[in-house]
Image (spheres, rainbow, N blue to C red):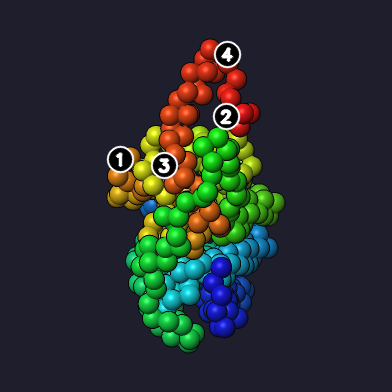
Amino acid sequence: MARTSGGARIALLAALPFMLGLAADLAVYATVRDQLPDRLARHFGADGDADGYVGHGGFLAMLVAVFVVLGAVSVFVVLRSEFATYRRGLRGLLAVVYATAAFLAWPMGASLVASRGTADGAAAVFPLWHLAVAVGVAALAAGAGAGLARCVPLPDARSPLGADAQGGADRIDLGRNEIAGWVRRTGSWMLSGMGVALAAAGIVILGLTDEGWLTPLSLFVPGLLIAAFARACVTVDRRGLTVSPGLVPWPRIRLPLDRIESADTRRINALADYGGWGYRIVPGRSGIIMRSGEALVVRRANGKDFAVTVEDSATAAALLNTLVDRGDRAGQAGQADDAGRGTAPQDGRR
């Protein structure tokens, strides 16, 4: 979580573009309301002709829901992101937030203008050049968002990947016949919030519009999936490293000890180092990235790194290094042989 003295200011800056976008579209509606038909065009095809309609109440409900939900998610993401504790990171986040709000606001306002003076929304035409204008407006808004980051006092640089190593090369004093394990749960409030917001948006659209089931389900189902995988259980024992979803038993990732060279603990940045959140694959490394901050980083036998963001990663790294060093790889293979013969393992019972 970003912990800065300007937290309230950051939240205001993140919410501001959605507040302005909503206010601008409501102002357009108020201006042209008397010239609008009872049925408004809310969607246009590739040819610019209207192919979806909604009443005034439904349009306003969707307008408010979209800007309020996305504004809340943006505030949540910016406040919870470690990326926002450094000026360059905050500039990037606010640029994305402002561009998103602007790109949404322009087409919604333009669709109202397209319906002005028509007897029915079916007669509305939305020229595709509006999309080009929306991209330009979004680019200008991104610049404004990046510039507003200077309103918050923050450092100008961040620690590079691995600069905050916290003793991952340490070992745990563990006897040859002693058994040890380490379990921690980790999660992302950002992913949880995104999942809940998408699911809620699907419910709102289903209840307030004549979309049918397809559009609401396309938001509701991904929202549930994102929320379900927004938490994970991380386990270190003589089987190696296991990462499994927090709410469902599958899919899980397991790195056996014989595929691990060493383990370390580092501070990573989700956006800068892995390009985002969730299961990430970038050249030379992969990982389960729930947030920015402390992470367990495992160097695999193939030379690539696998990371999982989790607290107390120094203990996990030390235990993994101890298990690898003392030869639990051979013990693990012996257990598999014993299991195949129906013999119970003897470690820990002497």
Please say if 117 is above or below 253: below
- Precedes in sequence: disc 2 or disc 1: 1
Residue lying furthest top: 341
Mark 1 crowdedness (10 Å alpha carbons): few <14, some 14-19, many ≥20:
few
Real-space Cα separation, disc 2 to disc 4, in angstroms: 15 Å
Mark 3 crowdedness (10 Å alpha carbons): few <14, some 14-19, many ≥20:
some
Residue at image x 52%, y 18%? 338
Please say if 317 is above or below 178: below
Q: Quadrant of the N terminus?
A: bottom right
- Precedes in sequence: disc 1 or disc 3: 1
Real-space Cα separation, disc 3 to disc 4, in angstroms: 28 Å
Real-space Cα separation, disc 4 to disc 1, in angstroms: 33 Å
Disc 1 designates what residue?
Answer: 302
Disc 4 designates what residue?
Answer: 342
- Precedes in sequence: disc 3 or disc 4: 3
- Precedes in sequence: disc 2 or disc 4: 4
Real-space Cα separation, disc 3 to disc 2, in angstroms: 17 Å
